[in-house]
Image (cartoon, rainbow, N blue to C red):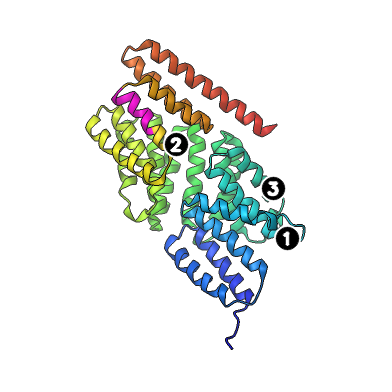
Amino acid sequence: MSTKISYTVVGQTLNEWYQLIKQNNIKKAEIMREEIKKSLTHMEENEKIIVYFNLIDSRYKLMKENYKDSGKLLWDLEQHALEESTDDMIQYYFYFFTGMCYFYENDFIEAINSYKIAQQNLDKVPDKKEKAEFHYQLAVAYYQMHQNIFSLNHAEQALGFYNSMDGFSYKLSLTKMVIAHNKLDLHQYNAAESLFEESITIASKADEKYAEALGNYNLGICYERQEKLDLAKDCFIRALGYEESNQIQTKLRAAYMLSRVLFKLNCHQEAQEWYTKAKEYAQQLNNHTYLAKLSIIYSIYKEVNESLLDMNLAVLKKAQLWSDVSELSINAARYFKKKDCLKLASKYFDEGIIARDKIHAWTEELNS
């Protein structure tokens, strides 16, 4: 009769697996997941460890950009997680990872509401690495809601933790990017550029290819926002050059932005090539948001098509992606103004203003 594996041993391995996930170490996390699955079949009976595995597995699937399966795992766990007998850590993980699922579905208000529930148990979490992760994720969510002061507050708290820990260069780099994006929104361009450059340097020294690619992508956004289009183009090309980053979502975003910048630079043939690549990535991911955004830039810069432009802006409005609606509407307005299409320019300037008003209403809803 074979000896059963102690559930405490498996529990420790689950903790180590979660640390790899937080560090975005995809290859090692994949290997450890298979090892844990084998251990579970020979483990002493313990329902709590099974629940922990499924919770961490939902976070693993988020890292792998498998958002649908992650959400399904969490919904299946919901009843167990809400039982009065459930321990504090299970409730914390459940609401924290649920918030992350809502975030990736672009439901930022529900994401923050879930994070707030998770925060009720944060003081009971002894691991400062987990506190850093929580503040980082909350900073990202508040940034998406244009709550820059709240975002900066949580990002600085996360940064304080990461600065005091070894082995977290990846998250240190990403946290600096969050701070940089907030500085960019506040029109502190020099500070934003410096922080993005710092994040790239940190990632490069630690050989964190994905973070380095992401840093170049974000620096490109910073340059594009300032109409430094040639510098933006170079950044997006660098972001797409990291084959080891192995993140198709980032390649989609960078290819879309490169196509957009090239259209603005009147490099239409090259822009068309990257538009086609980005569309292939979006179709592969079944990402309707980016398919709409790609159709929008095509309808502005390649073949002006007002009805198609309006139809795809409606897709973004339905998803409450008001920042994208505002940015793309104003881009359209500026382009049409240069082409002396003043009626279209006026229409899309108004669309941009209406979208900005929606952002203000959205943030008021969060604070109510």
Disc 2 marks which amino acid? Thr
Tell me how far mark 1 sits from mark 2, CA to CA: 37 Å
Dot 2 falls on a residue whose secondary structure is: helix
Instruction: Specify whether 358 is left or right of 313.
Output: right
Q: Is residue 94 visible?
A: yes
Residue drawn at the location 43% of the way across and 43% of the way down: 196
Instruction: Specify whether 185 is left or right of 257.
Output: right
Dot 3 falls on a residue whose secondary structure is: helix
Mark 1 and mark 2 residues within 8 Å of each other at the beta carbon: no
Q: Which residue is mark 1?
A: 86
Question: Which image quarter is the C terminus in?
Answer: top right
Residue drawn at the location 32% of the way across and 11% of the way down: 340
Image spot of residue 97 (x, y percent): 59, 52
Q: Is residue 24 above or below residue 360?
A: below
Tell me how far mark 2 sits from mark 3, CA to CA: 29 Å
Dot placed on the residue nearer the N-terminal end, 1 or 2: 1
Dot 1 falls on a residue whose secondary structure is: loop
Question: Which label lies toward us, 2 or 3?
Answer: 2
